[in-house]
Image: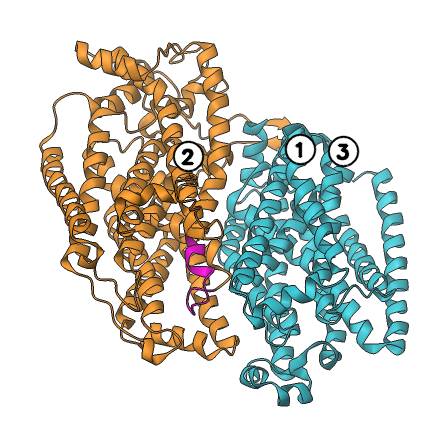
Amino acid sequence: MNDDLQSRLNRFRFLALVSGVIGIVLCVVGAFINTQRFFISYLFGYLFWLGLALGCFAVSMIHHLTGGRWGQVTRRFQEAGFMTLPVMALLFVPIFFGLKHLYPWAQPVKVAADTILQHKHAYINPSLFIMRAIFFFIIWIVMAFLLRKWSLQQDKTTDVTPTRRLRTLSGVGIVIYALTVTFAYIDWVMSIEADWYSTMFPVIICIGQILTAYAFSIMVLTYFSKYQPISETVTTTQFHHLGNLLLTFVMFWTYISFGQLLIIWSGNLPHEISWYLHRIAGNWKVIVWFLFLFHFFLPFFSLLFRPTKQHPRTLVKLAAIVFVAHMVDVYWMIAPSFYPTGIHLSWMDFAAPIGVGGIWIAIFIYNLKGPLLIPQNDPRVEYSLAHGK
Amino acid sequence: MADVVTNKTISPAAPKHAPSHTVANIKVVAPPAELAREPLVGNQRSIGWISDAIAGVAEGKTPMWWWMAFVPSVILMTTCFTMIVYLVSVGVGVWGPGHPVMWGWAIINFVWWIGIGHAGTLISAILFLLRQKWRTSINRAAEAMTIFAVMCAGIFPLIHIGRVWLGWWLFPIPNSNGIWPQFRSPLMWDVFAVSTYFTVSLLFWYMGLIPDLAVMRDRAKTTIRKFAYGLFSLGWTGSNRHWSNYEKAYLILAGLSTPLVLSVHSIVSMDFSVSQLPGWHTTIFPPYFVAGAVFSGFGMVLTLLVPLRRLLKLEDIITVRHVELMCKVTLATGSIVGYAYAMEFFIAWYSGNPYERYAFINRAVGHYAWGYWIMIGCNVITPQLFWFKKIRQNMMIVFILSIFVNIGMWFERFVIVVISLHRDFLPSNWGFFRPTWVDILTYLGTFGLFFTFFLLFLRFVPIIAIGEVKAVTPQADPHHPLGGAKEGGHH
């Protein structure tokens, strides 16, 4: 890494850290002013950035399994992304103190009045919620450390053992990722609405995370492509492939989101439709239109064209749009449950994502600075470089 | 076969120690042996050999085994048509469905066959867009399978309407009664989805065939063959401009086919999921049906190609690596299907809805529990065996497991259709379902239809895309020692 980039990153990290700390301090102040409001905003801000970390986790495993030139130049970014998981685990702790502000099943009065909550109580109650969350984080962190460790080991040796280990772990890991995220997000998001359920919902979460990770990778890669050593390696091909992947996951997100809507709309059953009724009530409709335009319409139609994907400058704008749109999507999944009549913004809705995000980005940059930015000795990477141009 | 001789003088296709050079400050060497990819065409077969081997299948004397397969297939196909005539002349009452299971084998068979078709479209369209070169050895046969499977599937919805002669009412034609189809019904969308699917698949398949039909024309020894292949190869000369247009058209058709992989089976899944019936109404249905369709399709591709590669001596073109990769796709899609089963079950409990819960408990321990456990055994356990390389490389085991996949996916539709319908909300509305001999013979008959067409395809059309396979050989790569304008490059 050259000095110019190094000093820029240092400055960036400092800025991120400062805004992160300010955001967190503001959140703490907010928690004393309006406790429930703080937890809602914090859950939103936290889950968005956790989703990015988990998305990086999934994408790096996808790459270990499938190969492809796009992954070799972005792998270190994804690793730096999922290596935020230990700190993200610590940042989850505040949520343990806000269960009764967030979840109906944690409020004895509501449980007493609702037979469905009583039925679910054996599975979803404060102590099991906490235990499961700890369990999921342990699995994620152990796997993240192994993925990182072997990837860095491969830098130092031409022996292929680390790569083979990475592939084996990723095969099992992608299954574990799907299962853990499924049950984690049933606890953390689906259970916010007491009676609501949808088998598609965890899939929408997973795809959203992977989509965010691709958008993020494109943004970081574009920035780094101005500096050595990435500037010497990256070509339009990698951007083209990443653009295609972004398009694929934009389509996939739209497909499953629309599928869920269509099936619930046509069934029109009270326990199911209420989720959407809360999310289209009053000026929440503005958010729906926003998501339609920027989570689907604009990126979809722009990314269909090859020049868009081969031009990093255009591609990065679309990636940024998708990134922001997904943040709004996470907000839309959480906040309307508490404000089912319309948007109810608070300054904490900005403080929380900035606070968590600042810290996330500071750790991300810290993780980038150690190892070489382009993984070395990966047999398939070298093969693809030699034969792929 | 002429250039086998020249090959002897050429260095191996993947040199063990490629000279290391530097690209962007990184030392570049060939991958170590264990990570090197097996070549897509085995034994360094030459371009001439590829043409001979593939075209040879459709030339020469008809082998005995072909007749032994063809005659029973035609008999079965005739049975299918006889059953249809019987059904149309007597009425749909000759089938098993009745209250409360108003949808029986007809819809099961429809969904089963159409699901099988999805592997062909996935291979030809999505794997093309993903630049998966291994698809070239299997896409032609898989696309043919798609077309014949969709034909088998299409029979059932058409004849189950009862009065077949009014089938055209399904199309939005303003007829004299002023009756319009119900556009909000997924059954209506099915009509458009399936007919589009068939049309695009057929076009895609035929377009891909044109250069190979020209090869057949040029090799033909009789006037009739020359004329017939000449007619269908549309004057293909293999000129640069022809290939350029061909590649563009291929990309466009691949792009058009890609959404069809998702849309057709998503809409089929909505036939069930837009209702309110427990076991049908669940949001994961569209992607779960698509994964199941691809799963069953790859099962059928394996069932067909594993024995065929041996019978037709095409092991160097459809290599063990190809079979392994197909097993991996089966593993991935089978795992998604397993995930969906688990989610349905968990959410049925989580929902706290007694009807949902009952529907799933009834699947596992009710009257038709055997169907459910066959489904779990075949669809959840079978694909998990493909984690092991030893199993993926054992052709006999792969063949047997692929048949389990086919069986399992038929039972999945049986579970969804029959078990969900036979006990819904009201116990007074419960009942049983039993297929009649007409049901069984019609279904068996569609195998006859499928195999008759598939066997004819084997005998008359190159079953592997000759031109595409050649394009992934080392000879086609100008940077390869074997390729470009060097030895072996002048064919």
Instruction: Using a 10 Å C-alpha cutoff, classify the residue at mark 2 as few (fewer than 14 neighbours), some (14 to 19) or many (20 or more).
Output: many
Q: Which mark is residue B124?
A: 2
**Chain B image colour:** orange
How many numbered callouts?
3
- Answer with the quarter of the image where residue A129 lies: bottom right
In the image, residue B286 above or below residue A201? above
Distance from Cα at disc 2 to Cα at disc 1: 23 Å
In the image, residue B455 above or below residue B233? below
The image position of residue A197, as x and y in percent, is 56, 70
Taking the spot 77% from the left edge, 63% from the top edge, the residue there is A45
SS for dot 3? helix
Taking the spot 18% from the left edge, 36% from the top edge, the residue there is B452
Taking the spot 82% from the left edge, 38% from the top edge, the residue there is A2
Taking the spot 27% from the left edge, 71% from the top edge, the residue there is B368
For the record, the magenta segment spans B268-281
Q: Chain of mark 1?
A: A
Distance from Cα at disc 3 to Cα at disc 2: 33 Å
SS for dot 2? helix
The image position of residue B265, as x and y in percent, is 42, 49
Q: Which mark is residue A309?
A: 1
Q: Amino acid at mark 2?
A: Ser
Callouts 3 and 2 on one subunit:
no
Farthest residue to the front: give it.
B176
**Chain A image colour:** cyan
**Which residue is disc 3 drawn over?**
A313
Q: Chain of mark 3?
A: A
- Residue B39 in view: no
Name the one closer to the observer, A187 or B91: B91
Instruction: Using a 10 Å C-alpha cutoff, classify the residue at mark 3 as few (fewer than 14 neighbours), some (14 to 19) or many (20 or more).
Output: few
- Residue B89 in view: yes
